[in-house]
Amino acid sequence: MFEGAKRPTIKFSDEQAQLLDIAASFARDKFPLSAARARIAAEADLDKEIWSEMAALGWLGVAIPEDFGGSGLGLGEAVAIVEPLGRHVAGTPLVSTTLLAQALLKAGTEFQKRTYLPKLAEGGIGALALSEESGDWNLTNLAATATKTVDGVALSGVKTFVTDATSAELMLISVLWNGRPALAVLDRAAFGKGRMTRETVIDETRRSYRVTLDGMVVQDCYFLEAAQTAAAFKHLDEAACLLAAAEMCGGAAGVIATTVEYLKTRKQFGRLIGSYQALKHPMVDALMLLDAARSHLYFAAGVVGEGKEGEIAVRMAKAAAGEALAFAADRAIQFHGGFGFTYDCDAQLYRRLGLWGEARHGDAAWQRARLAELML
Amino acid sequence: MSDETWPDIREAVRKLCANFPGAYWREHDRARSYPAEFVRALGEAGYLSILIPEEYGGAGLPLSAATAVLEEIHRSGGNGAACHAQMYTMGTLLKHGSAEQKARYLPRIARGDLRLQAFGVTEPGAGTDTTRIATFARREGNRYLVSGQKIWISRAEHSDLMILLCRTTRREDAAKPGEGLSVLLVDMRQAAKQGLTIRPIRTMLNHATTELFFDEVPVPAENLIGEEGKGFRYILDGMNAERILIASECIGDGRFFIDRASAYAASREVFGRAIGANQGVQFPIARAHVQLAAAALMVQQAAALFAAGKPCGSEANMAKLLASEASWFAADTCLQIHGGFGFAEEYDIERKFRETRLYQVAPISTNLILSHVATHVLGLPKSF
Ligand SMILES: Cc1cc2nc3c(=O)[nH]c(=O)nc-3n(C[C@H](O)[C@H](O)[C@H](O)COP(=O)(O)OP(=O)(O)OC[C@H]3O[C@@H](n4cnc5c(N)ncnc54)[C@H](O)[C@@H]3O)c2cc1C
């Protein structure tokens, strides 16, 4: 299936590995879990300074070509940045921003690409208004509509789980236009804050909003190329799954580290609880699930990074990552005993990250059902 | 003997089984031969007719007594599969046969003069999907002529009679798929002379299972059980007892594995201490015990419902599912804990491991039980 010299492997390339190192130490410094908790408590958006530093490092344009102001790397490299951010429950708009750029790259007009991509690379936050109340993971199963009128294009419908909507420069929306799924990128001027209602979601690090499109009228120049839209939806879904897998692998690594730390400090019956096989062996199981999930992830990153057909690899990676994190975070709660059931225990941050990650773009069972269709 | 756990029966069966140690079963396993001596001893002691009503010469005990017998056989390291069907196959005759058929056969079955322990349902093209069987019995005067093929028919070479499910109306001509099926009582010795070929199938366990080829085999019309065309229901009726008894064999297997695993874990020393001192070793055995105990309760409940004449299809199936999975987990744990020795024939573990695995597929596979529960207990749409 993969001929030639650059056969994707289950390891990162040197470039990706280097990036992973840098991103790991950045995330460790900038995103201690206490910061995540503080942000939750203050209902605050991401620290602007940190976001600017991320822009300066070139990460916001990591998968944007140099022609459009990006670093000219690819989605494979984005994985190396997202994974450590997941480990520290950073909850940044990096993923949505990267995905918006991907949609533009796939289906944007030349004008849209020239105008918006550099903005994103520089630090403009991108938000995705793709999900709807039906909760369907099929991105093209839509109820929101666009209708041509004398004033422009009238939108209707409600979008949910739009993270960082209020701080976004650009928003990607999906609607049915003449019965066909269409994508549009709206800039800040086009959507008022009045349309956004804060949603309480399981992962409290996310600033998630419900966005009402009803009554909005936009110009049709906001819409992406109709001919490329189907390809853009497919690509968005795959890229979203890939980055979610990266974030969840990071989460699994983080929660394993947190739990191992606890097993090495908490004593019962005069011994460290980590000395009990019934606790330490499952941590090894968790590590093995994580390792397997990472192999899937890095392979998928390689395939997608090279622009190859990656749906199978990506769906496997997302299923494996979701299950690895679910298992590790569940054991984390159990192994922290009564403390594990408290808000103060960090295990919950990871369990929530996992539930969020699974609920976005399809959980493991759904990915497997898609895989069965692709493979059987 | 009102105690539903049958301590006297259990004790007696244990004594009987002590005469048939592991070496006995290993010999037969190696040769894939029928444990005739064991079956004879069990029959002579009266255990195989335990469910036949006293009026026909049996002990007339409830199903729980038979579960006690089979559980003890399996716990001892033996295998009741060679003869368990002699206990319950007669149920179809007892429940749906005519007074004359019962008077004619049951007393001889109770005495052990006649073996009725073959049950012919499965076909190469119809396993789980029973109504698709194609073996056909054509009525001609006062007899049927049977043609077709059966597979996985156990003990066919060690049975004088067989309960055979066949079509008397083709599926496509029947009002419903479940109609047009009939049950015939086939005299195996006669049939073997008149067009029935029996071919043994070697399997990974010693199970005396065979393939049957019927070429215009005559069966007297008087051997029809119940009404023509209603046979599917009769067979379904009989399956509950079978499920519950096989579940009790799994419980016995599970206890065998747990007994062996505990004893070995307590005595085997590695790194200067008993391996059973490791949580990684003792917890799985404890878990196996917990799972088995739960499954055993389900088996008991199903047997009690059966004895009370109440509907027990779901409970019988759930008992079989739970018991077969619990015994399999116990088997896997026991094998693992024995290290290399688990693979040595003389420990009997690898043999029991192979034997207990069967019950997740036969007499009904786990998936089909889940499907039954989903549709009949939970009211979900049929999935196929
Ligand atoms: C040693 C042995 C002894 C046996 N003894 C007898 C006997 O004495 N008399 C007799 O009549 N039969 C006997 N059987 C047959 C046994 O009952 C069948 O093998 C069993 O019912 C499964 O049927 P099958 O082998 O045709 O599998 P299939 O029906 O082909 O099924 C194959 C697999 O697909 C799964 N499957 C099928 N349909 C579905 C579905 N709709 N949804 C989900 N999963 C599905 C099944 O669970 C199974 O795992 C014996 C079998 C063995 C191996």
Image (cartoon, coloured by chain):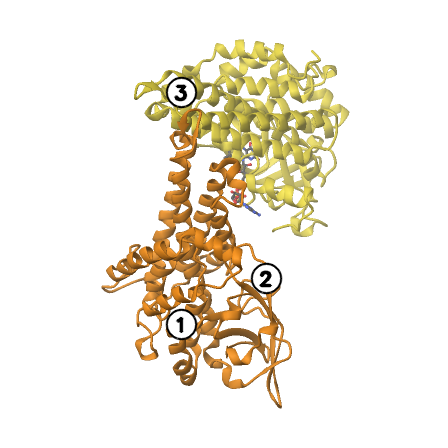
Give how far across and how far down residue A314 sits, in percent: 41, 59
Kindly identify which residue carries mark 1: A123
Task: Note whether residue B223 is visible.
Answer: yes
Q: Is residue B155 left or right of residue A123?
A: right
Q: Do labels 2 and 1 share a chain?
A: yes
Chain identity of mark 2:
A
Q: Are labels 2 and 3 on one chain?
A: no
Residue most toward the bottom?
A: A150
Query: Within 10 Å of the Cα at label 1, are there few (<14), some (14-19), or many (20+) other Cα atoms?
Result: many
Image x and y of residue A360, in percent:
51, 59
Q: Do the residues labelled 2 and 3 touch (CB within 8 Å)?
A: no
Callout 1 amino acid: Gly
Q: How far apart are marks 2 and 1 (CA)?
A: 24 Å
Residue type for callout 2: Glu
Vertical arrangement, residue B50 with respect to residue A190, above or below: above
- Tell which quarter ligand 1 is in: top right
**Residue at image x 47%, y 13%?**
B20
Report the side of A242 relative to B235 (left or right).
left
The colour applied to the residues of chain A in this rendering is: orange
Q: Are marks 2 and 1 in contact (CB under 8 Å)?
A: no
Is residue B109 visible from the viewing direction of this image?
Answer: no
User: Which chain contains the residue that carries disc 3?
Assistant: B
Front residue of this view, candidates B176 and B2? B2
